[in-house]
Image: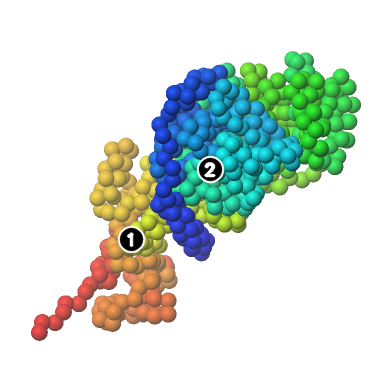
C-alpha cells in the first residue's frame, strides 16, 4: 500500500505537468501543411524498394498529422533497417513543399554523414538544399550553414547535438525529426521542448527508452509501429556465451570465406589497439582496422570508407557504429564484454548486421572469469530470446520492466514501475491524466476487504493463468451491478456454471461497491473484531452503531471503527460459513448507510 501511495503521488505530479504541456500543445495553433503536391508523388515513386504495408500506413498517419492544425508529436517504433529513414525523407519533403525548414537531429557524426548522403541522393533533381552539421564540417562550412538557416537558404539541416546550440536561429522551422531518439539525454529533449510547442515533431527509434515508450503506451503521444520486415530479410542468428579464442577465430574465418566483413566491438579506447593486434594474431590473413570516437575526423572517415570499399575485413571498433551504419556486406558481429552494455545498445548493435540478403551472425560474449550481475544476466537473456525480425519493441518493453520509466518530464531517470508493476502503473497514469482533464470527477476510493472466507477462481475452473488473471482484472474493473452480471454471464457461457468460491468472489465485489459508495476504504477481520476504516460518522450514526453492536469502539485519530464480529476469533470453534459472513457484513454496511429522518415541525 505504501509503494502504491508513493507511486500514485509521483504519478499525479507527472500527470499535472504532462497535461499542462500537452494541453498547451493542443491549444497552440501549429502549422497545417497542405495536401501532397505532384512533386511529392514523384519523390515517392522514385523510392528504389517496395514499401511494406506498415510503412505505407505510417506514412499516411504522419501526413494526416502534419495536415492538422495541432502540432504533431509522433513516435515511430520500427526495428533496425525497417525503413524509418524513408518515412523521415518523405515527411521532410512535405514540410519543404510549404516553404518550411526541417531539422534532423542524430546522435553520431557517422550517422550525420550517412543521412546527408541519403537525403541528398533522394532529393536529387529537386530544388532542396541539404546541409550537415557535425565535427566533420569545417568552421567555415558550419558558419555558412548557420547563416543559411537564418536567411532561409538551407531547407534541411542534419546534425548532432550542435543543432541544439542556442545561437542557431531558424527562419521558419516546421518539422523536427529526432533519429535514434533513445540516444538523447533528458536535457537535450528539454531544449527541444522549448522549440516544440508549435513545431511538428517526428521521433524515430528501434528501441525507445522506457520514458518515451511509456508516453506512447499511456496514450500521451501517438505511436506507429513498423513490424513487417523488408522482403528477403532473415533474422540474425544470435549466440550468447563465454569468450573463447577458438570461437572468435572460427566466426571470423567463416565470414571471410564467404567474402563478408566483420564488426568486432570492444568498447574501451585504452586497449582497443591491443585487441586489434590479438585478432590479427588469431586470424593472420585478415586485414584489421580500428575505429573509435577519439580519432581525428579525417582518420575516422578514412577507416570507415576503407571498410565500406572492402579494404578492411575486420573493423575493431567502439559503439560508435551502434546507430545508422549501413554496410550490407558486414554480416558477422562479435561483442566482447557484452554484459556491460545496455539492452537497447545490444539490440542496436545487432542491427548493424543482416541488412542484406545474407544470413547474419551475432556473438555476445562475456568474460567467464568475472561474476555477472543479475541485471546483466537478464539483459543477455532478453537479447538471446528476442531474435525475430521486428523484436525491437519487445526488447524495449523488457527494458521498461528492468529499469522502470524515470520521470516523464524531469530528469530523474529511474521510475516507480518496478514497485507497482507495468500494468498498474499505466492504469494509474491514465487515471491521473483523466482526473486532470476532468477535475470534477472524484477518484473512487480503493477498498480493501479481508474476511475469513474462501473467495477465488479455482484453477480447475479456468486452468490458463493468463485467462484467470484476465477474469480477476475484469472483476476488479467492474463498477456497477450491471457490469458484474455481464461478466458472470460471459464466464458461465465460456466455462460453465460458476463454482461456489467464485460466486463468493462476486459477493465480495458487490460489498466493495457498496463500501466505495459510502466512502469506506477497508473492512478487515482483526482478532475478535472487524475494522471498518477511514470513516467520519456523525454523532447520531455513532449512537446507532453503538446501540446495535455492543462493545463497538470508534477511534477518531485513525477514523476507524472496531466492531465485535460473530465470525472473528472463533479459534477452536466452528468457522462461520462464507455466505453468513457476507450477509453479516452486508447488514453492517446497511447500518452505516442509515440516515436519520429529519423531525417533523
Residue 18 picture location, percent across and down? 47, 55
Residue 138 picture location, percent across and down? 75, 38
Q: Which residue is drawn at 30% across and 45% down?
A: 487
Q: Residue at x 74, y 41 (%)?
A: 139
> Looking at the image, can residue 582 be seen?
no
Q: Which residue is drawn at 16% across and 77% down?
A: 597
- Quadrant containing the C terminus in the rendered view: bottom left
**CA–CA distance between discs 1 and 2?**
40 Å
Is 23 in front, or is 480? 23
Q: In this view, does 436 lie to the left or right of 402?
A: left
Residue 142 picture location, percent across and down? 69, 40
Which residue carries the number 1 mark?
A: 441
Q: Quadrant of residue 470?
A: top left
Image depth: mark 1 or mark 2 in front: 2
Q: How crowded is mark 2: few (under 14 residues within 10 Å), some or many (20 or more)?
A: many
Residue occupying the far bottom of the picture? 601
Is 203 in front, or is 15? 203
Q: How crowded is mark 1: few (under 14 residues within 10 Å), some or many (20 or more)?
A: few
Is 569 in front, or is 562? 562
Q: Residue at x 81, y 37 (%)?
A: 296
Is 224 in front, or is 232? 224
Q: Regarding mark 2 in the picture, which secondary structure is present there?
A: strand
> First in sequence: mark 1 or mark 2?
2
Residue 452: assigned label: none
Q: Is residue 240 above or below residue 188?
A: above
Q: In this view, does 4 lie to the left or right of 135?
A: left
Residue 107 picture location, percent across and down? 66, 40
Residue occupying the far left of the picture? 601
> Looking at the image, can residue 139 be seen?
yes
Q: Regarding mark 1 in the picture, which secondary structure is present there?
A: loop
Residue occupying the far front of the picture? 151
Residue 173: assigned label: 2
Amino acid at each position: 500500500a505504501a509503494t502504491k501511495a508513493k507511486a500514485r503521488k509521483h504519478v499525479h505530479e507527472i500527470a499535472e505537468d504532462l497535461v499542462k504541456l500537452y494541453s498547451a500543445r493542443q491549444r497552440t495553433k501549429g502549422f497545417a501543411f497542405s495536401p501532397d503536391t505532384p512533386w511529392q508523388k514523384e519523390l515517392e515513386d522514385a523510392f528504389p524498394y517496395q514499401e511494406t504495408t506498415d510503412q505505407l500506413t505510417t506514412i499516411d498517419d504522419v501526413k494526416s498529422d502534419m495536415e492538422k492544425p495541432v502540432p504533431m508529436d509522433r513516435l515511430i517504433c520500427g526495428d533496425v533497417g525497417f525503413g524509418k529513414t524513408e518515412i523521415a525523407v518523405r515527411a521532410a519533403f512535405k514540410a519543404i513543399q510549404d516553404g518550411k525548414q526541417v531539422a534532423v537531429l542524430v546522435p553520431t557524426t557517422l550517422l550525420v554523414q550517412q543521412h546527408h548522403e541519403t537525403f541528398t541522393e533522394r532529393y536529387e533533381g529537386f530544388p532542396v538544399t541539404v546541409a550537415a552539421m557535425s565535427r566533420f564540417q569545417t568552421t567555415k562550412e558550419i558558419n555558412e550553414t548557420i547563416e543559411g538557416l537564418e536567411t532561409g537558404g538551407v531547407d534541411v539541416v542534419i546534425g548532432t547535438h550542435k543543432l541544439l546550440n542556442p545561437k542557431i536561429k531558424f527562419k521558419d522551422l516546421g518539422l523536427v525529426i529526432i533519429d535514434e531518439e533513445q540516444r538523447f539525454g533528458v536535457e537535450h529533449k528539454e531544449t527541444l521542448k522549448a522549440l516544440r510547442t508549435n513545431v511538428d515533431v517526428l521521433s524515430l527509434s528501434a528501441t525507445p527508452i522506457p520514458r518515451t515508450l511509456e508516453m506512447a503506451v499511456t496514450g500521451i503521444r501517438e505511436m506507429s509501429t513498423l513490424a513487417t520486415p523488408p522482403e528477403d530479410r532473415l533474422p540474425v542468428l544470435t549466440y550468447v556465451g563465454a569468450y573463447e579464442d577458438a570461437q572468435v577465430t572460427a566466426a571470423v574465418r567463416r565470414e571471410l570465406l564467404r567474402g563478408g566483413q566483420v564488426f568486432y566491438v570492444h568498447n574501451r579506447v585504452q586497449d582497443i589497439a591491443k585487441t586489434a593486434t590479438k585478432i590479427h594474431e588469431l586470424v593472420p590473413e585478415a586485414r584489421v582496422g580500428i575505429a573509435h570516437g577519439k580519432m581525428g575526423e579525417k582518420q575516422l572517415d578514412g577507416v570507415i570508407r576503407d571498410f565500406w570499399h572492402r579494404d578492411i575485413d575486420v573493423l575493431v571498433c567502439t559503439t560508435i557504429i551502434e546507430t545508422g551504419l549501413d554496410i550490407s556486406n558486414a554480416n558477422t558481429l562479435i561483442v566482447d564484454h557484452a554484459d556491460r552494455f545496455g539492452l537497447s545498445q545490444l539490440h542496436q548493435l545487432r542491427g548493424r548486421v543482416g541488412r542484406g540478403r545474407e544470413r547474419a551472425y551475432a556473438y555476445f560474449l562475456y568474460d567467464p572469469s568475472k561474476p555477472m550481475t543479475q541485471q546483466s544476466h537478464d539483459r543477455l537473456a532478453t537479447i538471446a530470446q528476442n531474435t525475430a525480425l521486428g523484436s525491437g519493441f519487445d526488447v524495449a518493453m523488457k527494458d521498461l520492466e528492468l529499469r522502470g520509466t524515470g520521470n516523464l518530464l524531469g530528469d530523474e531517470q529511474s521510475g516507480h514501475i518496478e514497485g507497482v508493476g507495468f500494468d498498474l502503473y499505466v492504469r494509474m497514469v491514465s487515471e491521473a491524466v483523466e482526473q486532470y482533464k476532468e477535475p470534477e470527477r472524484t477518484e473512487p476510493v480503493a477498498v480493501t476487504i479481508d474476511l475469513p472466507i474462501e473467495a477465488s477462481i479455482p484453477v480447475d475452473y479456468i486452468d490458463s493463468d493468463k485467462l484467470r488473471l484476465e477474469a480477476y482484472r475484469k472483476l476488479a474493473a467492474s463498477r456497477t451491478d450491471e457490469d458484474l452480471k455481464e461478466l458472470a454471464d460471459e464466464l458461465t457461457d465460456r466455462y460453465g456454471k460458476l463454482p461456489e468460491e467464485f460466486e463468493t468472489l462476486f459477493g465480495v465485489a458487490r460489498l466493495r461497491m457498496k463500501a466505495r459508495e459510502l466512502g469506506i476504504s477497508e473492512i478487515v477481520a482483526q482478532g475478535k473484531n472487524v475494522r471498518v476504516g477511514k470513516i467520519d460518522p456523525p454523532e447520531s450514526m455513532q449512537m446507532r452503531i453503538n446501540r446495535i453492536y455492543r462493545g463497538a469502539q470508534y477511534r477518531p485519530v485513525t477514523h476507524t471503527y472496531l466492531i465485535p464480529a460473530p465470525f472473528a476469533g472463533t479459534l477452536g470453534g466452528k468457522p462461520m460459513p462464507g455466505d453468513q459472513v457476507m450477509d453479516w457484513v452486508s447488514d453492517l454496511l446497511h447500518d452505516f448507510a442509515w440516515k436519520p429522518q429529519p423531525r417533523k415541525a
